Amino acid sequence: MKTILCIGAGYVGGPTMAMIARKCPEYRVVVVDIDAERIRAWQSDRLPIYEPGLQDLVKATLNKNLFFSMDIAKGIEEADIIFVSVNTPTKTFGQGAGRAADLQYWEKTARQIKAHAKTDKIVVEKSTLPVRTAEAMERILQSGNPTVHFEVLSNPEFLAEGTAVKDLENADRVLIGGHDTETGRKAVKALADVYEHWIPRERILMTSVWSSELSKLAANAVLAQRISSINSLSAICESTEADITEVARAIGMDARIGSRFLNASVGFGGSCFKKDILNLVYLCQHYGLNEVAAYWEQVVTMNQYQEDRFVQRMIAAMFNTVAGKRIAVFGFAFKADTGDTRESPAIRVCHSLIEERAAVVITDPKALNNARKDMADCGDKIVYEEDPYRAAEGAHALAIMTDWAEYKALDYRRLYASMSKPAFIFDGRNCLNHRDLFEIGFNVYPIGKKPLSHL
Ligand code: UDX
Ligand code: ADP
C-alpha cells in the first residue's frame, strides 16, 4: 500500500486529500497539521471548514484510508508522496511587504521533510506559490549530503471554495509540472496515476515546473481581471442609465468571451485572487517588467475602488450621513456556501461604515465566528446576530454582502415592516428581485443599475 502525506489540513489540503482517499482506496492518505484543534475537528462531526458535500466525503473514508494526525515526523517517514499545502499569505513585513508571499511556513516544511526523510520522496507543491519556489525547495532539500532523492513537482489546486467537492470530482484539468529528467518523468507519472483514478487522462496536463507555477497565478489573475472589468463597467452603468446585467449578457453571449464570471459585485474576495495577483506583480517587478506589474496591479486597485464606491453610494443615498443609523450587513463570507471571510469585501465595507459612525449589525449563516475575529478591532461597536430578521429590526438599511441562497428566500415584507423608514436595500451581489423589493416599499440600490427609489 502506498502512502500519501499532506502537510497542512486547511481549505485545500483537507478536501483534496478526502477526495484522493475516496477515489484511491488502495492508498493510505495521512493529513498532518501543527494546529491540534484543526486536527481534532477533522476527526469529529464538526469539520473545521464548511463545504457542501465534504462531511459525507470525510465520513466515508475517515480512519479507513484517511487519517488526520499531528505526528509530522512519522508522516514524512512513511510517505511516498508528500503534498505541501501550508499557508502562504502575503508578507506583512520587510522586503516585498504587501506583495510578496511569506514563505516562512513553506521553508519550515521543507526543512522538516529533509530532517525526517529516510527514503526517496516525491514532494508536491499544492499551495499557490511564486514562480520558482520549487527551485528554492529543491535547493533546501538537496543541501548538505542527502542520501535520499527528492523530486519536487508543482500541482496547483484550482478548486473554488463552496464548490470544492464538485470541483475536485470533476476538475476541468489537473496540472502537473515536473522536470524533464528520468526521475522527473517518473515522479510525474506516479502523481498522474493517483488522479487517473477518476480524472480522464486527456484532462491531466503535464508541463514544466515553472509553467505550472505561473499558470496557477495566471488563472487567478485572469479570473479576477474579468470581475474587475465588469465592475469597472458597472461604474459606467451607474453614471449613465445602462444596466450591467444587460451589458454582461450581451458581451457574454459572444462565444469568444463566454458568460461565466461576469457578475458585477461589491468586489471579489477570497484567499487567492488578491494574493496571487500581488505575487504576480512582485514577480514582474523583480524582473524589471514594470508596465506588466502596473497592468495587473490595476485589477486589485479596481476591486478596492468598487468596495469604496459601494459605501459612497450608500452614504449618498441615505442623505449623506449614516452616523447613528443601524445598518444590517447581510453576509460576511466572501461568497456563498463557505464560512471563509479571508479578503471578504464585507471587511472593508464594515470598517468604512464604522468610520462613518454607523451602528453596524452583521449576520451570516456560517461566517459569524470569522467575522468576529476580522472585526475585533471595532470591539463592541459591532453587533453580531445569527437571525437576519432580528438583525434588520430598526435598521435604516440592509447591505447584501454575500449571495447566500437563504437571503433570496427571506420574507422581505416582514423585514421591511420591522425597519426604520425610509428603508434602503443595497444589493452588493445583484442577487435579489429588485422590482419586488421596490414594490414592498424599499429604496433599492443594485450594482451597476439605476436605483429604484420612492424618494
Ligand atoms: C478562486 C478560483 O476560482 C479557484 O480556481 C482558485 O483555486 C482559488 O481562487 P475562490 O476564491 O474559492 O476560488 O472563489 P471564486 O468562486 O473564484 O470567487 C472569488 C470571488 O469573486 C468571490 O468573492 C466571488 O463572490 C467573486 N465573484 C465571482 C464576483 O464578484 N463575480 C463573479 O462573476 C464571480
Ligand atoms: P489553504 O487555504 O491554502 O488551504 P489554510 O490556512 O486553510 O490555507 O491551511 C494551511 C494549514 O497549514 C493550516 O491549518 C496551518 O496550521 C498549516 N501549517 C502551516 N505550517 C505548517 C507546518 N510547518 N506543518 C504543518 N502544518 C502547517
Image: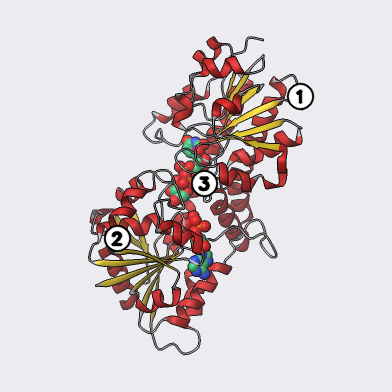
Decide if residue 55 is on the left or right side of residue 230: left
Q: Amino acid at mark 3?
A: Asp
- Look at the numbered disc 3 and say if its residue's Cβ is closer than 8 Å to ligand 1: yes
Tell me the element at label 2.
helix
Characterize the local packing of mark 2: few (<14), some (14-19) or many (20 or more) Cα atoms within 10 angstroms.
many
Determine the residue positioned at 26% across, 67% down: 27
Whole-percent x, y for residue 208 in the image: 39, 65
Mark sitting on residue 352: none
Query: Mark 3 touching mark 2, by CB under 8 A?
Result: no
Q: Quadrant of residue 406?
A: top left
Whole-percent x, y for residue 321 in the image: 76, 24
Q: Which is more toward the observer, 191 or 281?
A: 191
Determine the residue positioned at 64% across, 43% down: 301
Query: Mark 1 touching mark 2, by CB under 8 A?
Result: no
Compared to residue 338, the image places residue 425 above or below, namely above
Compared to residue 380, the image places residue 405 above or below, namely above
Disc on the earlier residue, 1 or 3: 1
Tell me the element at label 3.
loop
Q: Which residue is mark 3?
A: 340
Q: Which residue is mark 2?
A: 21
Characterize the local packing of mark 1: few (<14), some (14-19) or many (20 or more) Cα atoms within 10 angstroms.
some
Q: Which is more toward the observer, 291 or 241?
A: 241
Mark sitting on residue 321: 1
